[in-house]
């Protein structure tokens, strides 16, 4: 924040304080936007790597992308898989399947549950930690 010297009469105090707070809010908003962008970029890179390690190269691991939305008062980012949008939810958690699940004896079961392939949740925590670190760095 720039060090400005303010000199104002008492009856102009409200306007002076509003101006100072507005200047500060603008600076903080820019810092938060930068932190969001850095955290989201790092998150996309990490989740692509995690997907490659678990599932190999292909549409799923290469489909990760992000969208960052900003306005006057906020900045937020979303990471999603553009090539196979429903698959991350199915892989991350268990879901019921019909026909095609083998039991421990190798016989076909009529219904079963898949095993979860947790690879997104740990990266979500990494993104939160990265964002927190970036905010502290930007605001200091």
Image: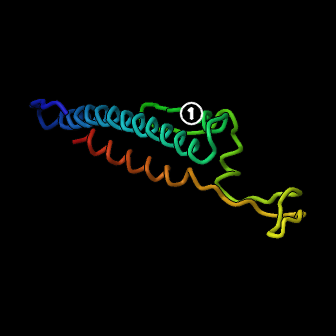
Which residue ends up furthest to the bottom in the rendered image?
Answer: 105
The residue nearer to you, when weighing 33 against 122, is 122
Residue drawn at the location 87% of the way across and 57% of the way down: 98
Q: Nearer the viewer, residue 128 or 52?
A: 52
Callout 1 environment at 10 Å: few (<14), some (14 to 19), or many (20+)?
some
Residue 132: x percent and y percent? 35, 48
- Count of numbered labels shown in the rendering: 1
Q: How is the image coloured?
A: rainbow
Q: Is residue 136 left or right of residue 95?
A: left
Q: Is residue 56 above or below residue 115?
A: above
Q: Residue at x 32, y 43 (%)?
A: 135
Which residue is disc 1 drawn over? 65
Closest to the observer: 32 or 49?
49
Which image quadrant for residue 101? bottom right
Q: Residue 115 location in percent, x, y?
A: 70, 60
Q: Residue at x 60, y 33 (%)?
A: 62
Secondary structure of residue under mark 1: strand
Image quadrant in which you'd find residue 14: top left
Q: Is residue 112 left or right of residue 85?
A: right
Of the 4 image quadrants, the one containing the N terminus is: top left
122 shown above or below 63: below
- Quadrant where the image shows the C terminus: top left
Residue 41 appears at what percent x and percent y? 45, 35
């Amino acid at each position: 924040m720039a060090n400005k010297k303010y000199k104002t009469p008492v009856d102009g105090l409200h306007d002076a304080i509003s101006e100072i707070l507005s200047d500060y809010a603008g600076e903080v908003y820019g810092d938060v936007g930068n932190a969001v962008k850095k955290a989201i970029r790092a998150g996309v890179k990490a989740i692509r790597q995690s997907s490659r390690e678990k599932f190999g190269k292909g549409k799923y691991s290469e489909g990760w992308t992000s969208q960052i939305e900003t306005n006057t008062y906020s900045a937020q980012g979303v990471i999603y898989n553009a090539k196979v949008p429903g698959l991350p939810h199915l892989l991350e958690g268990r879901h019921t399947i019909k026909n095609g699940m083998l039991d421990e004896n190798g016989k076909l079961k009529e219904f079963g549950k898949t095993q979860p392939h947790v690879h997104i949740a740990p990266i979500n925590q990494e993104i939160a930690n990265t964002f927190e670190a970036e905010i502290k760095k930007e605001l200091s």
